[in-house]
Each structure stands twice: as C-alpha cells, then as structure tokens.
Image (cartoon, helix red, strand yellow):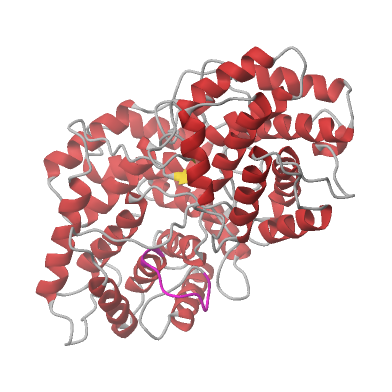
Amino acid sequence: MKIADRARPAPLTLPDEIRPDDVRQATARLVAYVSGRTDDDGVIREQCESRVLESALALSLMTRTGAESPARDRLLAYLRGHQESPDKLDRVLASLALGGAAGREPGGDSALVGTLAAGVLGAAPGFISTRRRLMVYAVLSVLGCPLPADAELPGGGRVPTDPLHSWAAVQQAAITRILADALGVRNGVTEAALDTLLATDPGTTVWEGYALMHLLVLHALAGAPGHEETVRRGLGTLLRHQRTDGGFPFVLEMHNWCTSTGGLALHAAGADPALLNRMAATLSAQRGGAALRSLSRGQTLTGGWSMSPIVAQNDVDDTSCALEFLQVVDPVAHVGTVHSGVAALLAVQGADGGFPTYVQGASSEPCMTAAAVCALGPHPATAPQREKALAFLAGSQLDDGGFEPGWSRSRLHSMFRVRLAACTAGPDDLRSAAMAARIEQSARETQNTDGGWGMQPGDPSDDISTAYGLITLCHADDPQPVGAALTWLLERQKADGGYGGPPDMVGPRPFAYRFPLLTDIPVLLALGHVRARVTG
C-alpha cells in the first residue's frame, strides 16, 4: 500500500481547477483526524460496530436459553430498527430473530433459504462457495427455517483433513453440529466437531475476539445435552461486549490492522515522525499474535502478525501491511522483526506462486499475493519468489481487468493493490506491465461521471472505492481522471476532517462489517499517493 518508487513514473500535473492548497489543507485535516484517534502508545483502537448477523444470532440464543435482561431489551430495539433494512439478508435475519423472540413460527421456507444463500455466494470467491452456502443454511436453521434439500454436513460428512485455518476449522465444526442436529445425524464426525468447539473454551472467553464464531459455537453446543451451563456462561461472556446501540459486532477488535494501515496512510501523507515511530515500536512488539492453542490444519503462517493482540491466527494481509509500515518508518531499528516477518510470508507461498490468507496449501488469492509482493519488494533476495507471485497475478486477471473478490466488497480493492505490486516488477517484465495497463484501463472505463467509483461498476460513487480508484490511476499517465476523483473526494470531506460512506471490508466473506476509521484510512492513503505523484 505504500508509495511506489518515486523515480517512476514521471510526476502528474493536475487540472487548473484544482488548487494545490486545497489538497494540502484537506490532507492536513484528515491527518489530524486520524492522528487524533491514535492512543499514546501509537495504537489505533477502533471499535467494530454492531451487525445484524451477530445480533440476530444473539437474540435467538437468548430465546433458546430463556434469558431475560435489560440487555435483551436493548437488542430487541436494535433489531427492530433493521426490519426495513435495504439489505435483504439483514431484513430476513432481523425478522426471523424477532419473530422467534415473540413466539411466532418462522415464516421462511427452504426456497427462501436457498435464495438467500445464492445471493451470498454471488459475492464470495468460488473456492469458499460450499463452505459459505452451508454457513447460511446453519444460521437460518437456528433461526427456525427448514433446510433445503441439498443440505449436507461439511466435507460430505467425513472427518476433514484439508488445510484449514483455525477460524474456518471452528466454523466448520459449529456448522457440522448445527446441521447434524437439524438432520438428526450423530456419528464420529459430529463428536470430533464437538471436541473442536469445546477447545475454544466458550464458557469463559470470546475465542480470538471472534464474536460471530463464539455465537455459532454456543448455538452448536445448545443442541448438545450436558452443555447447558457452558452455553449460559458463554452468553454472559458475550454480553460484556454488547455495543451501546444494543447490537453485537463481528469481532471485538482489529488493533494491529488499524494501526498498520493507518500508519502507512499517515506516513504517505507526511504525518509526525515521532507518532509514526511510536506506532511502529508497538506494532513490532505485537509480532506473533496471542499465545493460544492453534486449531488449524496444515502449516499456518507463524512469526507474522494477527489482526489484533488477542488473536493468535496470523495472516498474510496483516503481516504484509505491518512489514511495509516498519520498513518505511525505520527498517534499521526493526531489522530483526522484519527479517522474521519476511521468512513467515515466504513459508506459506504456494507452488503456483500465489499466497493464501492463512495456511500453506490453501487456495492462493490475488489480493493476498499482491500484499505479499509489496511487503517483499524491498528485499532483493526475494526476487525469484516475487517473480512467481507476479506471474500468478497476471494469470489470475479476469477478462474485465479485475480479479476475484478478496476481503472487500469493492472491486477496486484488489485492483489497486495488484497495481502497486506491479510497481515492484523489473523493467523487462512485460507481462506485469500489460497487467498494470489493463487495470488502469478498467479503472478509467468504470469511473462514474461524477469522478468517483462505486463498489461495483454502475454503483453510486462512495468514499472508499473512489480512494482505491484514485490510487490506481495515480500510477497512470493521464491526470484528468485523477483530478476528477480528487475533486469528488475534496467535496465530500466532513467538517471534522473525516469521511463516511458504506463499509467495504467483509468477514466472513462476503458479509460486510464496519470499523468507522477504516473509511478514513484509505482516503488518507489516496491523498498520500497524490502527494507523491502530483507536482506542487
């Protein structure tokens, strides 16, 4: 995500109607806004907002266990406020949970479940389609819906052995138990799944800060005789994290991710070096993640970074962004940490040259591969691995110039990161140059007439997607689209210096979640790229 080598390409000159002072002042206001959200130790401790998915599951669990409390009343109010949500899945989840709480029979049928699952799958990468379809079935099942005819246990009802990271392994176990209850199945697979669920210690902790997974585990245990007390205590543990609006979040925190991406954006925009050094020092100390038992299958990424200090699961994205940040702030001071992080990344590179998100042997993903290439760029010894990764990216490019969905609802997220990865290619790498040119062409062709971009072509312009598009075209040769995007962003800055709009981050894919500052950070990063590329 960092600024590419300033020696290439040549600087851009913005259209006359954009005053450099306006850009500088907008950047300074946003720097002040993001800096002001940074604690004294340099950590950005942003809070995840409530989401209907987790809130509906929480109310359903309270209904199953007969829990009555003021917390339940606040949760009811939150979900009532989402019964007319523009998102169809949110409307259904809220209505089913509220209906169950009121003692009404669910109005849904198996056709509705199948329709909702199909809608979810259309926005998710193909390699997780079966897993995500069964997750939707399981969620709607605990809310009272019947299962469609094609419902089955994950893995075809066999004990799974494929490479899988901890979160997916626990999700798989929870879905296995929930669907097995609905299907009336009990066998060795369901008993193995029960062992995995209990290993998360759900009675005393929200495992890895993952509220959604905690709820799925508790629902799975609620159908297992003898675990009533664990479910009751686990619900009490969850209630400590209820948000002020009455709902529940996807995850409790993402301190490392917010700090590394925020730090990269602040560095690009010319923020206070003392602040950047504090951020880097604390982030460096968080390498490795929480000391929790791994429930992964296969070789996980270790020695890198997780999304927060309470999370054990390291991943390519957090590791790559942390490495990029440490390297631009002070590569000498953090040389040992950087060296270990680079080794951690290389250990999970796939035979196809690409990188997965979590576990060696899992499917390589374009966005994660681009992230790793950018992190490895400053290390000449990694040139062979980067060449393989760039070849994987070029081979993964779609006919429209984009890439498969990553961890964002915005099509431009993967595109801008791959475009930055292409900046690390050598001058003779014609394949990467052609890939970059197709990305730029696609970005130009899908820019809205107002100068911005939407999540998908034809969608209304939003702050995050426009930031991604602006970064992409900062590395092209035409200043006009850059000027139009910059004008759009300058006009939408709020009085406090921040930005707004819909969230793009998804987890589990393709369900969107919101950390408000993760809207401001991409815009600040885009302004930082403008600062490096534009004269004046």
Please state which of residues 190 and 64 is positioned toward the viewer in this rendering.
Answer: 64
Write down the region rendered in magenta. Answer: 456-464
Quadrant of res 404: bottom right
User: Looking at the image, which residue is at 50% across and 21% down?
Assistant: 237
Q: Is residue 290 left or right of residue 159?
A: left
Find out whether residue 526 is within the magenta segment: no
Residue name at image x 56 percent, y 24 percent: 235
Q: Residue at x 33, y 41 (%)?
A: 46
Screen quadrant of the N terminus? bottom left
Residue 175 seen in render: yes
Quadrant housing the C terminus: bottom left
Task: Estimate the x, y position of residue 528 in percent, counting from the top left.
Answer: 24, 61
Q: Is residue 506 left or right of residue 187?
A: left
437 and 408: which is toward the camera: 408
Residue 199 in view in this figure: no
Q: Position of residue 309 (x, y in %)?
A: 39, 27
Q: Is residue 460 magenta?
A: yes
Above or below: residue 52 compared with residue 453: above
Where residue 230 appears, as percent x and y from the top left, is: 63, 15
Side of 408 where 404 appears, left or right: right
Residue 406 against residue 242 in the figure, above or below: below
Out of 479 and 178, give the one closest to the viewer. 178
Give coordinates of residue 297: x percent, y percent: 68, 28
Q: Is residue 213 above or below residue 325?
A: above
